[in-house]
Image (cartoon, rainbow, N blue to C red):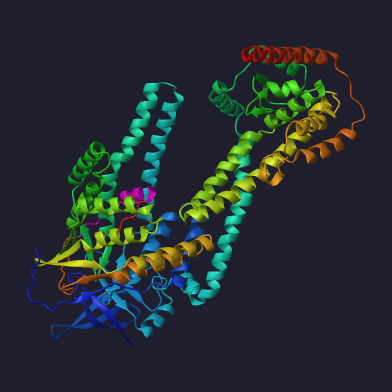
Amino acid sequence: MAFKAKYFDGKTSKTHHAKVTINSLQWTICYMDDESPLQVNWSVEDIKKSDVFTKGFIAFTHGKNFPFQRLESDDVNFISFISNHDNKNFNRGIDTKLHQSSKKTLVSLIVGLIGLVFVAYLYVIPAIAENFAANLSQSAVTDFGNYVYRVLSPELNIDDEKSKKLQGFVDELEFDTEFNIEAYVANSDQLNAFALSGGKIVIFSSLLEKLENKEQLVALIGHEVAHIEKRHVLKNVSRNLSGAVFVSILFGDVNSVTAVLADNAHMFSQLSFSRSLEKEADIYGLEIMKQNNVDLNGMPELFKLLKRETDIDIPSYLSNHPMLKNRIDYTTTLALEQDRFNNNYDLEEKWNDLKSLVLDYEEDKLENENSENE
Amino acid sequence: MEVIFGNPSTTKKIKYFGKGSEFAIVYFKNIILTLLTLGLYYPWAKVEILKYHYQSSELDDARFQFHATGMEVFRGFIKIYVILILLYVYLLFGIQSQSEVMTITAASLFYLFFILIIPLAIHGAVRYRASRSSWKGIHFKYTGSKKELFLVYIKGVLLTIFTLGIYSAWLQVDIRKYVLSKLKFGNVSFNFHGSGGQLLWINIKLVLLFYITLGIYSFWYYKNLWRFYIDNTSVTQNGERIYLSFKMKAGDVFELLVVNFFLIAFTLGLATPWVAVRTLNFFFKFSELEGYVDTNAIEQSTYDDYDDATGDDFLDFLDFDLL
């Protein structure tokens, strides 16, 4: 059986219309050049089929050394002969199958791709990122926290005297933590507090001023220590970064609108993760309070206080913290279950010390402001 | 110089046979394999995708062929990643040392590397792509010298700095001129005739008209830019020079870009293979070679078996595609 093909001899670009006859050892290519018949033989083991599938077209090259000869054909008989050939060099089974029922293949590839992306984004990447955060050595975590603190501290107005008193209060408490807890007070009007990886806690002075009793302060410290002990900052950062890198690799090149959509979806999922960490810190903070025999009601009281002091309670899906109303509810439920607690007088003393220093400072500040205004 | 010897003047065009649904199979298969192997498969994916487009493009009843292998491209990527990781480690070391001298040295070295490597990467990339591309059994060949291209580039970069960026139009044109003049296809050679001034004017018009027209001028800008690149390219065989032409209007650009945009945005990128096929169809549909070339009389010259894909990979890393 002879097939129609175009033959290129590799020396010039001349197109030779040829007939190809195939047997098990060699292909015979016959063509006319300047009215004289010519014949070329290709040994089967040196023939290479082009390794990409395009419908209605096949091509082969032959030769060990340059220049390579080439055959191209759109002869349907040739194509069907090759696609039924059992020599693996001519017939990469998978590709032929993939293109045979192309609609089915396409649907399964798209479904497979979407599934793969979701599984990777929802399970594989977060698991790897959190595993990394959980297994990073203690000293590396502390180094990371110290680095962040070094960058932040020039902007934080750290008050050494108050920090010392706060540290005294913290030292009265017991924690099961691998890190050494260092507490700082920053003079600021913001109602805020935060924890850094590796053991540093920063509480803003106005929040301290608003606190009514030592239980609320233990609740606040317990919450922040929980972030440190559970390595929340590191988990959050590594999860956020790895997810963002994944999203930008997939969609960054696609186009700007898609990239914005994907980034926003990632932000919402990240906020939900932050909220779950906050809740975990609340619950673990209660554990710390229990361990120190402190009245658990300090935690819901702290949230009530924050709710009074902040005008709006942001709906949780837009925030990295759960709504205060919910936090009050679930911490109250847990506080009700507590059967006993003590009043730790040493702790009370440290609390009074700290509180009077904070109040004195605020009074001085007010006086200064008034005198300036006058 | 244009010489016409009375040969029959014909118009040649590349016919593109790619189909969105067919290319999508190739594309998604490769994306999935790349994801599953955490990116290790990318070189093979890239090669197969290029092979598909080459084999789907036909000129004078003969298809193009891309001869690269995934392994060659993979080796190039390994080289680049080793160099980049070393540079990064050095940069991090510099920043960590908290010494200003160390930080500045490391950062300068880092940026200098990226600036100086570009001409070498272009050289490597063009030479590799040319060596691995053939049509009718004849291979392309890049005969440029690294040193000459480097000098063209350095001169352009320095003048760009001194002219506060204005010279960058000439820099782009100079590089294109050099690279095309050294590209050979048997006894066929190529040239670029555009000037930096023309490119600068195209860019100035964009700056002047973009905001006034609320961005609508971009379609004319792309029309002008693409026509500038394609219309100014010539092909010379046996002393006869003929020009490429790109007969397209701003409306065609509008249709291409707007439809592509919506296809991608509404499918979150799943329409990418269809968009690739549409785009190639667009460029081939409007590009013509006007004049006579004897496509049966091109003789193979010696083979430049250049298997180093590092330059090509580096441009890929910078998201900068040839052609």
Magenta region: B303-319
The residue lying furthest to the right in this view is A339
Q: Position of residue A315 (x, y in %)?
A: 71, 44
Does residue B245 belong to the magenta stretch?
no
Foreground: A167 or A306?
A306
Query: In the picture shown, does residue B186 fall above or below A303?
Result: below
Query: In the picture shown, does residue A282 fall above or below B150?
Result: above
Q: Position of residue B184 (x, y in %)?
A: 18, 60
Q: Position of residue B197 (x, y in %)?
A: 20, 51
Q: Picture quarter containing residue A215?
A: top right
Does residue B309 belong to the magenta stretch?
yes
Foreground: A300 or A244?
A300
Query: In the picture shown, does residue A276 fall above or below B273?
Result: above
Foreground: B225 or B157?
B225
| Residue B71 visible in the displayed image | yes
Q: Residue at x 52, y 56 (%)?
A: A258
Q: Dividing the image into 4 quarters, which one contains the N terminus of chain B?
A: bottom left
Q: Picture quarter containing residue A23?
A: bottom left
The residue lying furthest to the bottom in this view is A1
| Residue A176 visible in the displayed image | no
Q: Dividing the image into 4 quarters, which one contains the C terminus of chain B?
A: bottom left
Q: Position of residue A292 (x, y in %)?
A: 82, 23
- Asked whether, in this view, residue B31 is left or right of residue B145, the answer is right
Q: Residue at x 60, y 60 (%)?
A: A115
